[in-house]
Image (cartoon, rainbow, N blue to C red):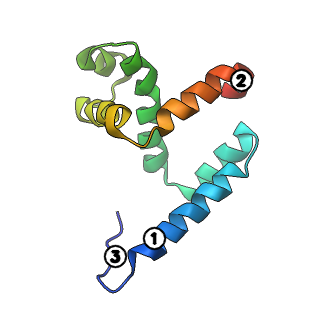
């Protein structure tokens, strides 16, 4: 991750993050989001995000970390981080899952 110098205000990063969030919110089709993410992220970043998303439903079902690892090959450390985010994060996973469940045809 990029290191910011002490002279760069945190608000620049916050403004950029909000602009990125707005850009994603303006995309209405999964294909558009996929194209945007492929343009924005490296293959490794896409894999990391996909791995995190893949373990969310398994964690919510109560599947043990080791079993999730065996099923997905996602590291136990990553699984633990996702679990912590599910419990203490901003609620984004839960919102995405609720919306996906409400419109299952959009999940593909």
Disc number for residue 103:
2
Above or below: residue 104 compared with residue 12: above
Name the front one of labels 3 and 1: 1
Mark 2, Cα crowd under 10 Å, few <14 / some 14-19 / many 20+, is few
Disc number for residue 4:
3
Mark 3, Cα crowd under 10 Å, few <14 / some 14-19 / many 20+, is few
Q: Position of residue 91 (x, y in %)?
A: 46, 38
In this image, 15 relative to 5: left or right? right
Q: Position of residue 62 (x, y in %)?
A: 34, 13
**Does residue 108 appear in the picture of this structure?**
no
Mark before the other along the chain sequence, 1 or 2: 1
Q: Image point 67% across, 45% down: which residue?
A: 33
**Does residue 51 appear in the picture of this structure?**
yes
Disc number for residue 13:
1
Q: Image point 40% across, 13% down: which residue?
A: 61
In this image, 32 relative to 51: left or right? right
Mark before the other along the chain sequence, 2 or 3: 3
Mark 1, Cα crowd under 10 Å, few <14 / some 14-19 / many 20+, is few
Image quadrant where residue 5 sits = bottom left
Secondary structure at numbered mark 3:
loop
Secondary structure at numbered mark 1:
helix
Secondary structure at numbered mark 2:
loop
């Amino acid at each position: 991750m990029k290191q910011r110098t002490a002279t760069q205000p945190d608000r620049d990063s916050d403004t950029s993050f909000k602009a990125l969030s707005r850009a994603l919110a303006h995309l209405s089709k999964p294909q558009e989001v996929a194209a945007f993410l492929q343009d924005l992220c490296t293959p490794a970043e896409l894999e990391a995000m996909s791995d995190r998303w893949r373990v969310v439903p398994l964690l919510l079902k109560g599947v043990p970390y080791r079993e999730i690892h065996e099923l997905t090959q996602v590291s136990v450390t990553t699984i633990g981080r996702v679990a912590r985010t599910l419990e203490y994060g901003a609620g984004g996973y839960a919102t995405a899952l609720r919306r996906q469940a409400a419109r299952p045809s959009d999940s593909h």
